[in-house]
Image: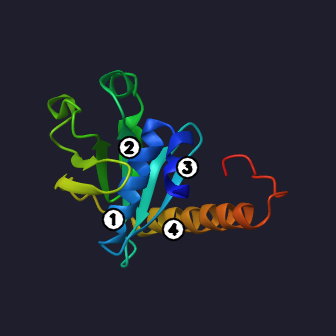
Amino acid sequence: MPDDLNSLQMMPGQLLARGVSRHVRSHDFVTVEELVPTPGLRVDVMALGPKGEVWIVECKSSRADYQSDAKWQGYLPWCDRFFWAVGPDFPAELLPEETGLIIADSYDAEIVAMGPEMRLAPARRKVMIQKFARHAAVRAQAARDPGFVLPFGG
């Protein structure tokens, strides 16, 4: 029951992010949400694979949410693969064909189309893995310590 109460407090995009995170875990990826790869950008989900693969997933809960996103191409230099995550009723024909597609709900997801691989340069990969680790550590500390103040971008 606590899971259902938590769902009532989450925004639609956060519910999609939860389903995506649960699904990619079955592919041995771990995730963080709302990571800032560079000032001005904040990804919905960053997934880190067992071999250091970096995936970025942008969750769109509606046509209007997607159409208002003018920054998504700015995420491409920060990942090996880029995906959209949308609900089953989303008009997927709106999404660019050269991107990955995940159909999700708040409990699970399915990768429908694998986005093309654009391998990160080693230096950029190192930066992203460090950002992931620091972001995850800050979030874990905040969960353990209710008095902890999240730093800017945390």
Left or right: residue 141 compared with residue 89: right
Give the alpha-carbon distance from disc 4 to disc 2, as whole Å: 18 Å
Q: Nearer the viewer, residue 22 or 115?
A: 22
Q: Which residue is drawn at 22% across and 56% down?
A: 110
Residue type highlighted by circle 2: Glu
Whether pointer 4 and pointer 1 mark residues with C-beta atoms closer than 8 Å, the reply is no
Q: Name the residue under label 2.
A: 58
The disc, 4 or 1, on the residue closer to the chain's N-terminal end is: 1
Left or right: residue 96 compared with residue 45: left
Residue 129 numbered tag: 4
Callout 1: 10 Å neighbours few (<14), some, many (20+)? many
**Coloring scheme of the render?**
rainbow
**Foreground label between 3 and 4:** 3
Residue type highlighted by circle 4: Ile
* Image coords of residue 83 (percent x, y): 29, 49
Could one spot residue 124 in this view of the protein?
A: yes
Q: In this view, does 45 lie above or below 123?
A: above
Residue type highlighted by circle 1: Val
Could one spot residue 37 in this view of the protein?
A: no
The disc, 1 or 2, on the residue closer to the chain's N-terminal end is: 1
